């Protein structure tokens, strides 16, 4: 599996929506999106549990590789891909209209800065 391009890594709120879309597509492509979205208990059978734990590594790698090193401390103590994914969603998703307006203003400033260059 190739590493995520540095420019595609999440840096927080500024590129959260793009990060979420890219990450969801990668998780779907690797057929491991269920590990972050669905609520399923770990299997009780020891062989199935071992298989589940082995398969959990792929979505964990995808998520960790898709964020900047500065964000790792926020998720370092979490054990599952689902916990990490939900933590990142909670940290960076826009939850109020005020936050949405601030993000739109930032985007507008970015667009007008590019036109001047």
Image (spheres, rainbow, N blue to C red):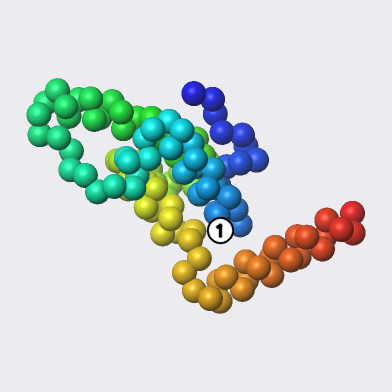
- Give the residue at mark 1: 13
- Which quadrant of the structure image shows residue 42? top left
Name the side, left or right, on which 10 lies relative to 64. right
Any part of residue 31 in sight: yes
Badge 1, how many Cα within 10 Å: few under 14, some, many 20+? some
- Which quadrant of the structure image shows residue 55? top left
Instruction: Name the residue rendered at 48%, 61% in the picture.
Output: 93
Judged from the image, the secondary structure of the residue bearing numbered disc 1 is: helix
Instruction: Name the residue rendered at 43%, 46% in the picture.
Output: 73
Is 56 situated above or below 16?
above
Any part of residue 70 in sight: no
Position in image of residue 86 (x %, y %): 37, 52
Is 116 situated above or below 99?
above
Instruction: Name the residue rendered at 65%, 68% in the picture.
Output: 104
Name the side, left or right, on which 89 lies relative to 83. right
Instruction: Name the residue rendered at 20%, 25% in the picture.
Output: 50
């Amino acid at each position: 599996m190739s590493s995520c391009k540095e420019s595609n890594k999440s840096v927080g709120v500024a590129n959260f929506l793009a990060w979420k879309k890219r990450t969801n597509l990668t998780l779907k492509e690797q057929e491991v999106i269920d590990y972050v979205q669905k609520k399923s208990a770990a299997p009780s059978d020891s062989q199935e549990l071992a298989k589940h734990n082995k398969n959990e590594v792929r979505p964990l790698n995808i998520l960790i590789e898709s964020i900047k090193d500065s964000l790792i401390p926020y998720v370092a103590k979490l054990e599952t891909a689902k916990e990490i994914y939900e933590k990142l969603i909670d940290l960076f998703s826009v939850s109020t209209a005020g936050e949405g307006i601030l993000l739109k203003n930032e985007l507008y400033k970015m667009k007008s800065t590019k036109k001047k260059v």
